[in-house]
Amino acid sequence: MSRIIRHFWTLYLTLLGLGALALLAPLLARGLADVEIDSDEGWNVVRALRAAAHVQLYGQPPGLDFTNYPPLSFHLIGALSALGLDPLFTGRALALLALLGLGGLAGSLVARLCGQAWAGACAGLGFILFLALFMPVRVAVDDPQLLGMLAEMAGFVLFLRRGPLWLVAFLFVLALFTKHSLLALPIGVGLALLWQRRWAELGLFLAAGMALADALLWLSFRFDGPYFFAHLLAPRAFSWQDMASQTGSFLVRFWPLLALALGWGWQGRREPAPQACLLALIAALVLGIGFSGGDGVGLNVFFEALWLGTLMAVMAGAAQGGWRRWALLWPLLFLPMASLSAWRELDALPQARAEFAAARTALQAIKGPVVCENLLLCTEAGHQSAFSPYFVASRIRDGKLSAAQIDTLLRSHSLVAVQIGATDRPIHRPQFTPDFLAILHQDYRPLQQGRTLSLWVPR
């Protein structure tokens, strides 16, 4: 029996390794391209450059643009860019290192709880591969979430190892001031302390967290402006359809892992570590499902649940064995299609780079107000987009802004150039209303039109 178990884990680790090689290789190669991989990259670069130039991120109330993220990652990348590093590739490198760090934390925790190095290797490599399967557009891409999660998961691992609670709270607050939706693990730790009736420790945990949060909040108001909460809590439209679609996408890929994880947590609920993991996973699932209906919210709202679910499922497979461990193979069924898609995207990258470079050169020669859906393109061409297409579209859908106000900018030819389309999605996107696109085609002509983006100027 022990030989069969050993053969299974050898097979599983081998499949994870081969899967990681097949999927991560094209994604890492893609990360070396000087184009916008995800539409958030340009937005993040703009904020980092503002922080580097000591421009307040929340100095004005939200108008046609907003900064609905906390400031820590922007100041970190801005400080590094002030030293001469490129903010785009710095952000990508930090995100990649954070992903590897998250895998390392999952692996070290499982190895410590199980006492088996192979279990830790499966958990660490499994999380990295599953995240790439689930949302490849977050691998080696400039986005602050993984950096924030690294602090969050480090705090959680420290809690399970009985580390100082003030330091646990410190790491959680750093995570929240990197991405403010990273709440699941702090909630899990708080509930665990409450369940275990560790009143003095719960008080210390809350007091330390509030003290640091107050200090960082004061610094944000002092150096980044008085409209911190107006930006951070800017309302979003909500879609029940999006919530159902994104939750379904997550469950289809990972329901066997989640079933294993929840079962392991429930069976060990009287022990401190499984109890804390169970409470944190439930919080992550509830928050992920709730957040997933927000306008512009992506599948990354389930990353905390994926991290916890992966390590808990591996723990269940190691502890319970039998047929249950075969459930760990389920996500790998989606690997061939994901790998094929990643390699195809890599093959199309030279054309995207050529079109991006041509549009950048064309924009550099244009003087006056412009609007870019691809904010990285605008930034590299020396322009600032007259408005944020995503934010404006969201406010129009939410009834907070009149579409006619934006359409007037086109009819009056106040915009000397408009760029639509992005490197990873079709040209016509919900960032622009049908009326806006109709006016664009009527009153403007394409200066450049390609598969990945198009640039329009007045007729």
Image: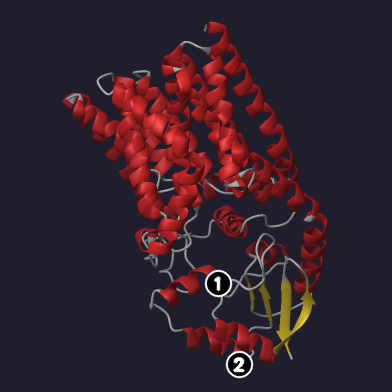
Q: Nearer the viewer, residue 224 or 413?
A: 413
Dot 1: element? loop
User: How far from the left and from the top, in percent, is residue 233?
Assistant: 36, 60
Quarter of the image that includes the C terminus: bottom right
In the rendered image, which residue does mark 1 sit on? 431
Q: State the residue at coordinates (34%, 35%).
A: 280
Looking at the image, is 315 positioned above or below residue 46? above
N-term mark: 2 or 1: 2
User: How far from the left and from the top, in percent, is residue 391?
Assistant: 49, 69
Q: Nearer the viewer, mark 2 or mark 1?
A: 1
Residue 178 in view: no
CA gap between label 2 and label 1 equals: 20 Å
Which quarter of the figure has residue 164? Answer: top left
Dot 1 amino acid type: Gln
In the rendered image, which residue does mark 2 sit on? 412
Q: State the residue at coordinates (69%, 38%).
A: 24
User: How far from the left and from the top, in percent, is residue 200?
Assistant: 18, 25
Q: Name the mark on residue 348.
A: none
